[in-house]
Amino acid sequence: MVLNIPPQKLAVSSWCWASDFYRGQFSLFDLPGRAAAAGFESVEANDFMLPPPSFSRVTRPFYALLPHGNPELWRYRQTAIRQLKLELDSHRVRCLCWTLNTDFSRGGVAAVGRALYHRWGLTAAKTLNVPLLRIISGGQAEDEVTLSLVRRMTSFVQSAVEQLPHITVILENHWGISTDTTKHLALFTQVKEQLPSSLQHRFALCLDPANIAQADRQSAWTRMAHHAGHVHLKTAVDNEAIDLPQFLETVHNAHQGRYDGTFTIEDPSLVC
């Protein structure tokens, strides 16, 4: 499939090599080389694909003691992030987006582990000099959009864009609370409204065409596309076809016929 997207606007995701990752044959250290070999200038890096650090068999159980701590926190080491930066530079590939699997749904004791994950995630984003930082809401589909949830996400987004002046934070529809598009848009809108007006343009949606119930996809695309600052590209999910041309038309139409944001391929069939 010919996408007709300028190379500087297009990245390939580490998720394209998920099958190799789960077989122990891929980590983020391999991403720059594979992306370059496939002809890509940019990548989107999933933090859970960082390689296991030295002595992780000893240290990982201690991270599990953090109440509701992020399950990938144990993977973070600044030495690993610096090594990834060296790999990117050596292959002349840039990291367009660093992805965090955030969870803003829990308060109380969860704040300790969340704060540590956020701090290390922002440090990684700074080291890699990424223009985009992807987050998700977390929680469960049945959870409601509460004032506490909005405040927790707003605090993080504001802190991120103030600490890293070159970054835009993008909120992906990635199950959990965002399973319901109405809740997802309500959360996004309320967080954006609570940000200082000078920072609001640096918070946008990351629109994924597949993370939506099949019956609701077209309407959800239409409702979210106007707020999209970054878009994922897929042709199928769970053996269900995604009408990618229709999806792209929906995105462009929401932006007066010409969406000018960035894209990431998350489908191995589109990597050639």
Image (cartoon, helix red, strand yellow):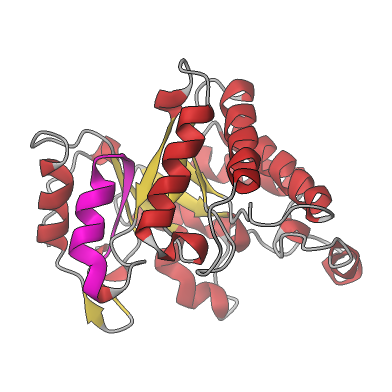
Q: Position of residue 18 (x, y in %)?
A: 47, 71
How far across and how far down the image is residue 130, in percent? Answer: 50, 34
In the image, 108 versus 204, the foreground residue is 108
Query: What residue is drawn where x is 47% and y is 38%?
Result: 190
Left or right: 259 in relation to 57:
left
Q: Is residue 68 left or right of residue 55?
A: left
The boundaries of the magenta stretch are: 215-234
**Location of residue 239 in the rendering, given as x and y in whole percent from the top left corner:** 27, 84
| Residue 197 pos. (x, y %) | 46, 17
Given residues 46 and 155, the one toward you in this image is 155
- Residue positioned 72% across, 60% down in the render: 70
Q: Reply above or below: 152 against 240.
A: above
- Residue at 25%, 68% in the rendered image: 216
In this rendering, is residue 257 above or below 55?
above
* Residue 173 or residue 96, whichever sits in front: 173
Residue 132, visible in the rendered structure: no
